[in-house]
Amino acid sequence: MNARLVALEILNEGISNFFVSRNSWKKTSNLTKQDRAFVRRLVYGTLRYYFEIDKIIGTFLKDAKRTPNDLKNILRMGTYELAGMKIPPYAVVNEYTSIAKPEFKGLVNAVLRRISEISDEINLGSGLPLWLYDKLKKDLGNIFPFFLEKNEFHEIYLRAVNKSRDEIIEDLKKHDIESYSTHFSPWGIRCVEGIDLDGFEQFENGNFTFQDESSQLVGIAVNPKSGEKILDAFGGVGTKTTHLVQIEPKAVVTYNDINKSKISIAMDNFKRLKKFPSKILSVDVMSSTLSEKFDKILVDAPCTALGTIGKHPDLLLRLTEKDIAEKAQMQLKMLEKLWGYLSDEGEIIYSVCTVTKEETDDVISTFIQNHSDAVCVDPFDGKMNFEFGGLGIQLLKWMEGFYISKIVKKEIRG
Ligand SMILES: C[S@@+](CC[C@H](N)C(=O)[O-])C[C@H]1O[C@@H](n2cnc3c(N)ncnc32)[C@H](O)[C@@H]1O
C-alpha cells in the first residue's frame, strides 16, 4: 500500500480522536522498513506543527472550518512535506493529488501548488499554540530554548536490562541500527534513527526495554537498597518498577496502578524482562486504605507530559490551560495522601515528565509549606552535578523535560 495513504489513515484517526493509538501503527506493518520510517516522520511532524500548518492552509481555503477533515489532513501532510521535510514540490503535489478523492483532486492540486511556491520561505516556528508558547517561555525562562530543541527530534532511548549495554549496542550494529551509550544513565542507549523491532529477538528476550534517559534517572533517585519496602504507587506499564528490581533485586518493591490495561501490559513486561515486583496492587490510591507503610514511595504522577511532545505530539491537540491547573491540584492531593503511608525518615520521590511550573516546583513548595516534617533534598545526593534549586531538578537542560524531587520525612520530636 502507498505509504502516504497509510499515513493519512493514521492521521485521520489520530486527529478525530485527539490521540494516535499504539494500534494505529500496526497499519504500517506491510510497508518496507524505509516506508515505515517515512510514515512515522510524516505523521509525527504533521501533528507536531499542526497549529502552524493550519494557519498556512487556512489562508488558501475559502472556509477552513467547513472543509472536511480528511481533505484538510491531505493538505496538512502535503504542507509538512513541503515546508517541514523540504521534499521537492513536483513529488509532493502529484502524490497528494493522486491519493485525494476525485472531487477534491483539483483543490488539493491548487492549494499544494501555491504552498510549494512559498515553501522555501515558510518557517514552522515552535509548533506550539500561542498560549502554551507564552506560558512555557515564562515558566522556563533561560531554559526554554532547550525545550524547543529537545522536542524537535524523536530519538528513541533503550534501557539495557539482561545484557550489558555494550553487547546490545553491538547487536544493534548488526541490524544496521546506529546507537550510543547515554551520558548520565549507566543503562541507557540512544538510537538516533529510531528502532524497528521487526525480527529483533533481543527485545522479546527481555535484554532491553524502551525508556528515556530522564526516566532512567528516577531509578537512580530512588536508589533502592536491599530489604527496603518501596511502593511504586503509579506503576503504569511497569517501566520504573522493573528498573527498581533490576537495580536491587533484594528490595521489596510493590507495584500499583488503577488502570486495567496498563496493569496487563505491566504483567507482560515483568515476564519479558524477568523482573518481578514482590507485590502487585491495583487500587485507587486516592480512595483506598493501604495496609502497610513504606520506606520509599515513588510518586510518578499523572501529568501533562509536556516533556514528551517530541514522541507524543498528538497531546498538543488535546491539552488545555485548565488541564495544567487540574493536574497540579491532583498531584498535590496524591502527595498528601501518600505521605500518610511513608515511614519516619522515609522518602517520597516525586517525578513528572513535564515542564510547567505548576506541576513541578509549585506542587513541591506548597507541599513543603503544609508539612513541617517534610524536607527536600537533592534527589541524587550530589552525585550527578545537576543544579539543585532546593525543591527539585528539571532535567531539560541535559535531556528530555522531566522533573524529579525527593522529600524526606523527618521525625518530629515533641
Ligand atoms: C505517569 S503514569 C506512570 C508511568 C509508570 N510509572 C511507568 O514508568 O511506566 C501515571 C499512572 O498513574 C495511574 N493512576 C492515575 N490515577 C491513579 C490513582 N488514583 N491510583 C492509582 N493509579 C493511578 C495511571 O493509570 C498511570 O498509569
Image (cartoon, rainbow, N blue to C red):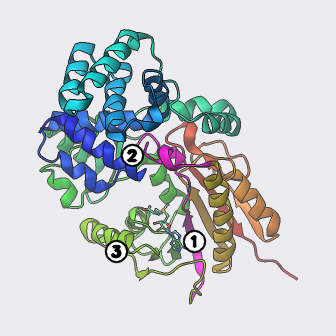
Q: Quadrant of the N terminus?
A: top left
Local SS, label 2: helix
Q: Is residue 213 or residue 69 the one in the foreground?
A: 69
Q: Is residue 248 or residue 336 the one in the foreground?
A: 336
Q: Which mark is residue 160?
A: none
Residue tagged by mark 1?
297
Q: Quadrant of the C terminus?
A: bottom right
- Residue 283: percent from the left, percent from the top? 49, 81
Q: CA distance from mark 1 to mark 2?
A: 37 Å
- Residue 272: percent from the left, percent from the top? 24, 66
For label 1, the crowd category at 10 Å Cα-Cα, with few meaning under 14, some 14 to 19 and many 20 or more, is: many
Residue tagged by mark 3?
276
Residue, x 77% and y 60% (percent of image)? 366
Q: Which callout, 3 or 2, points at the residue further toward the start of the chain?
A: 2
Is residue 388 on the magenta stretch? Answer: no
Local SS, label 3: loop
Residue, x 76% and y 77% (percent of image)? 411
281 sits left or right of 110 in the view: right
Question: Which span is picked out in magenta?
Answer: 292-320
Amino acid type, label 3 = Phe
Instruction: From this view, report whether residue 98 is shown above or below residue 40.
Output: above
Amino acid type, label 2 = Ile
Residue, x 68% and y 80% (percent of image)? 340
Q: CA distance from mark 1 to mark 3?
A: 17 Å
Q: CA distance from mark 3 to mark 2?
A: 37 Å
Residue tagged by mark 2?
15
Query: Which of the 4 quarters of the picture holds residue 201?
Result: bottom left
Residue, x 59% and y 49% (percent of image)? 320
Instruction: From this view, report whether residue 244 is shown above or below residue 399.
Output: below
Q: Which callout, 1 or 2, points at the residue further toward the start of the chain?
A: 2
Query: Which of the 4 quarters of the picture holds residue 363?
Result: bottom right
